[in-house]
Image: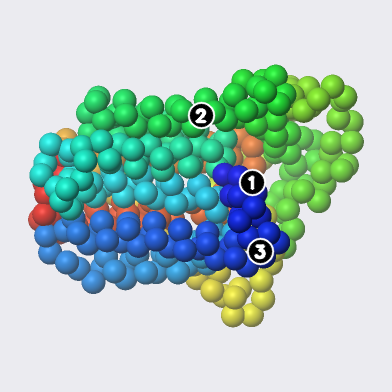
Amino acid sequence: MATLYAVLGYIAFGDKVAYIIFLKVLLVVAALAWIAWLVFRSRGEKSILDFLALLLISTSSYTVANIVNIQVEEGFGFVGLAVCWAVLLYGASPERKGHLGGRGYHKHSIAILFGCSAAIALLSKSSFVLCVAVLLVAFGYKFGLRYFLACLLVVATSGVAWASYQYAGSGRFTIGTSLDGWNLYKGNNPYFLERYPPTPGTSLDMYDDDLFKDSPAGGEWVVNDFYREKSFAYILNNKEKAVAALKKKFWVCFFSVEKYGSTSSEGVRKYYELGSMILFRVVFWLSLGAAVADSFVRRQRALGIAYILFVGGLLLPYLVGFAYTRHVSVLALPAVLYLLAFIRRNTVAPLEAPN
């Protein structure tokens, strides 16, 4: 998605990068505004809590960075994941009049919207495949087989198109990329423990020339397979170091408030980023607690389990490979949406009974 958008932007605006970024900002902010509208529209009693929570999380440093960034995959995938969770949490079942909180929606429009959002996430980053699968199953459970199949058709079409493109260019039919093995080795090699997490303002990319100097000839997939096998061999032969590395990755994924894997900041911006990370961690853990609580309530059990599996499916590839702060940032909006839905279900009767 990042590459496709950059190419289309260049075709439309030439080398005027500011225009390309500005258009992306408009599109993403429009999607976030629709999510905010959906949150308010689907409620019986309006609350300042909804407004403040959405405002805080949308103006936090990691969300703003994802909105304006056209270089990294998270800058596109995060909005697809957020729209999917907005539909799951605040979209009424199709059999109800005026589902999605409005009137006049076609019965399959919600499936197409969800499918397009899931496809954007899937095509943004190959590591999103597990969490997208969870979202699709959750959608099917809530909205039924008919709408699930319409949604699945959209996602499958995008996946097949990408896999076909790869097959035509390199002979491998897959929805992954030939960088997967490369990235796996970056997180599982003899030097990882002393280099991770990277010092503020740097990333593991600075070691690429040394780490991959022995890459074999034969094409991108030969290199991918070579480093994938080296990664597995390292893990099997160095179990204690692999566990020690896993602990570091787990800390970055679930607890750290430091910014790893990107440029460092100073002054006011540094405190802005620190405050954003603290806010995210509070909301993130509260949302997980809410999901665990929902897992024990019969009417909300499927939703709670889906959210826990979604978080696990999204973070698992980074626990296996390596994690930066930006990798975790895509959970910010789903976390606040889930927490808001949980608070409202347990404090104020919603406009429509939860499914």
Tag 1 residue: 3
Image position of 317 (left or right of 241): left
Tag 3 residue: 17
- Give the image location of residue 18, x and y in percent: 63, 67
**Residue at figure coordinates x 64%, y 80% from the top left:** 267
Q: Residues within 10 Å of mark 2 (few under 14, many from 20)?
A: some
Which quadrant: the C terminus?
A: top left
* Tag 2 and tag 3, C-beta contact below 8 Å: no
* Tag 1 and tag 2, C-beta contact below 8 Å: no
Q: Residues within 10 Å of mark 3 (few under 14, many from 20)?
A: few
Image position of 25 (left or right of 216): left
Element carrying mark 3: helix
- Give the image location of residue 47, x and y in percent: 20, 68
Image position of 64 (left or right of 112): right
**Residue at figure coordinates x 48%, y 42% from the top left:** 120
**Residue at figure coordinates x 22%, y 28% from the top left:** 144
Q: Which mark is residue 159?
A: 2
Real-space Cα separation, disc 2 to disc 3, in angstroms: 29 Å
